[in-house]
Amino acid sequence: MVFQGFNQNDFNTFTIDNLDGRMEAIQTRIQPKFQELGSELVDYLAAQLGNEVYLHIAKHARRTVNPPNDTWLAIADNKRGYKKHPHFQVGLFDDHVFIWLALIYELPNKREIADSFLNKYDEIKQLPNNFAVSLDHMKKEAIQITDLEIKDVERFRGVKKAEFLIGRRFLSDDPLLADGEKFLETVKQTYDILIPFYQLAMRARV
């Protein structure tokens, strides 16, 4: 199968009130698309990085009452998991799609990675103006790269639960999302820009 893009029905998944109904919709509407999209991206990133990477699709297995507000695919160099490693994401909330390089709170050496990002703060600020940063993967809100301040990176270093996700977001009605081929190309272009920061994080991880 070829990735066909996302549509309003995918975003409507997050209006389903109950856990079982929303999870079924995630599994039937969105996860097959993640599989198609992720398979393409794994091959692309492996070629760009020169090493094997692995696709992980969020299972939301720990949820027993509250349905998830978003869902995502992740790509990391670890076959068993991704949360403790720098990784790439594509995912959906009810009103937008996100494309991130994700550095989340479970990283065992978050402080060292944050230090390396503080040293490259000027380069982060030179990313395209349509890039954004999220400081909490659980929340919709993000900061435009133009509004990012050094204190935001310092908080990532100093606060245990603080996170740093950097990339792009597209509103649910953006025509790009309905064109699978163009969206895939946009994700690749976004990752190309983010790969040097991924590699920076990986070097700091050692």
Image: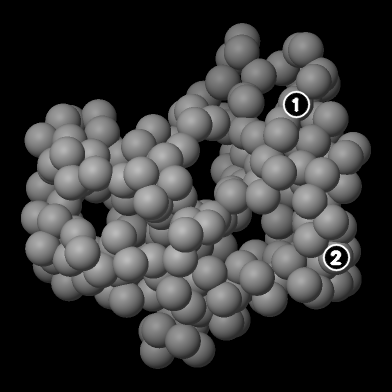
* Nearer to me, 200 or 78: 200
The colour mode here is one colour
Would residue 166 appear left or right of 12 to someone viewing this image? Answer: left
Q: Which residue is depicted at the point 77% across and 72% down?
A: 182
- The secondary element bearing badge 1 is classed as helix
Labels 1 and 2 touching (C-beta < 8 A): no
- Label 1 environment density (alpha carbons within 10 Å; few <14, some 14–19, many ≥20): many
Residue 33: image quadrant is bottom right
* Nearer to me, 187 or 206: 187
- The secondary element bearing badge 2 is classed as loop
Viewer can see residue 3: no
* Nearer to me, 62 or 41: 41
Residue 14 - label: 1
User: Which x, y percent locates residue 152?
Assistant: 23, 39
User: How far is mark 1 from mark 2, CA to CA?
Assistant: 21 Å
Residue 43: image quadrant is bottom right
- Which tag is nearer the camera, tag 1 or tag 2? 2
Q: Is residue 130 above or below residue 93?
A: below
Q: Give, as a three-letter code, the residue at label 1.
A: Phe
The image quadrant where one finds the N terminus is bottom right
The image quadrant where one finds the C terminus is bottom left
User: Which x, y percent locates residue 133?
Assistant: 40, 47
Residue 179 - label: 2
Viewer can see residue 86: yes
Q: Which residue is depicted at the point 81% across and 19% down?
A: 16
Q: Give, as a three-letter code, the residue at label 2.
A: Asp
Residue 177 - label: none
First along the sequence among labels 1 and 2? 1
User: Which x, y percent locates residue 124?
Assistant: 29, 62
